[in-house]
Image (cartoon, helix red, strand yellow):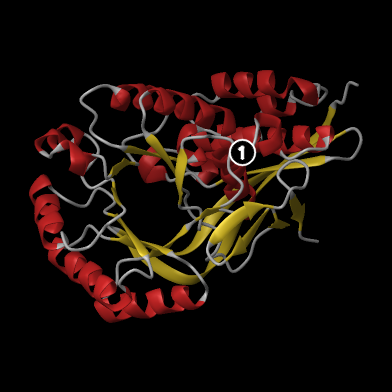
Amino acid sequence: MQMKIKTIRSYGRNLALSKPYSIAGYTFSEVENVFLEIELENGIIGIGAASPAEEVVGETCTQTLQNLQTDFVQNLIGRDIRHFRQLIYETNQAFSNFPGTQAALDIALHDAFGQYLGIPIVEFYGQKIKTLSTSVTIGIMSVAETLNEAEAYRKLGFKVLKVKTGENWQEDAERILKLNERYQNQFKIRVDANQGYSLEDLKNFLVVTKSVNLELIEQPLPVGDEHELLKLNVKTRKLLVADESLKDARYTLQFSQEPQLFGIFNVKLMKCGGILNAFEIANIAQQADIELFWGCNDESIVSITAALHTAFACPTTKYLDLDGSFDLAEDVVKGGFVLENGYLRLNGKPGLGVKMIE
């Protein structure tokens, strides 16, 4: 039965963080998100959200909101939600250099369509994974502060830590060694250098932390220097995650070629432009035998849940780093996923399974 789009609304929100944090080169205390509501004739409202990282994709939230308020978007009113994939295709053509804009529309259309069908998005695509542990992030801080954060996360039941590094490899190594010394096998430890290392820094860091069974290292070298990684052995490269280097399917094809520079790909809906584009990355990575790591920015529950639906529909998903809504002091929705002892699972409700906060 035909079901037309009745209204489309978009708006921005500055969402306060419960505590500021630092990564290599940046400190944050609040985060801007852009929201999109697509209402169908029968009253169903699909919600999308975007939090693009300008330094990675070149799009600001201001641009996202402007794009979502164009005639192109308003002209989607009257279209049939059953054609959601065609609408996403047209959106991606219209806003080809704006992945945040693409993601907001893609997510909202998926949510509306899932609710229209009465099933969760993950079930529409076929659920491959029911639950998986997510890492939680410790920003760049002193050894003492790092240990305090780790203890707080341990008490909350988390099993995987992602430690931000990249400003000083010696201090980074000390933090990792102290964490490992204190917690032994209580945590899996991941490292995210945010492009902060030279090849020499990375080699030194790897030597000093050799005794620690690091699970992975995200984006150690700056974008453009990836070829330097060929100077490392294959075993080491298998631990490395392409993040800022891997934006969309074109980059996925490039980094899937032999010899492979990275053994793991970080997929973010805010880099690639939403759920359908993320599946393109996942399909290419699967053929290249590369594992998937699902990451995020500081994002609303809306887009974190969308990423989780996508991740759980992909058989090669191995790592989750979907903690982007945990540090928000406020949001516009609730629901979507359930967090228990560091494990994430979806709530089984139609669409995204999120509910607007009145």
Judged left or right of residue 171, residue 145 is right
Q: Is residue 226 left or right of residue 328?
A: left
Say which quarter of the image contains residue 188: bottom left
- Whether 293 is drawn above or below 29: the answer is above
The residue at the point 26 percent across, 40 percent down is 238
Question: From this viewpoint, is residue 311 visible?
Answer: yes
Q: Residue placed at 61% from the left, 38% from the top?
A: 104
Image quarter for residue 152? bottom left
Q: Which amino acid does label 1 sit on?
A: Ala
Q: Is residue 204 above or below residue 100?
A: below
Tell me what residue is drawn at x 20 percent, y 60 percent. 167
Residue sitting nearer the eye, 278 or 56? 278
Which residue is labeled 1 in the image? 104
- Residue 11 image position (x, y, % from top left): 67, 47
Figure quadrant of the C terminus: bottom right
Is the N terminus in the top left, top right, bottom left or bottom right quadrant?
Answer: top right
Q: In which quarter of the image is residue 356?
A: bottom right
Element type at mark 1: helix
Q: From the top left corner, tell me how far across and down residue 273 is, in percent.
A: 52, 33
Q: Could you say where residue 124 lies in the image, as x and y percent from the top left?
A: 71, 31
Q: Which of 98 and 281 is in front in this view?
A: 281
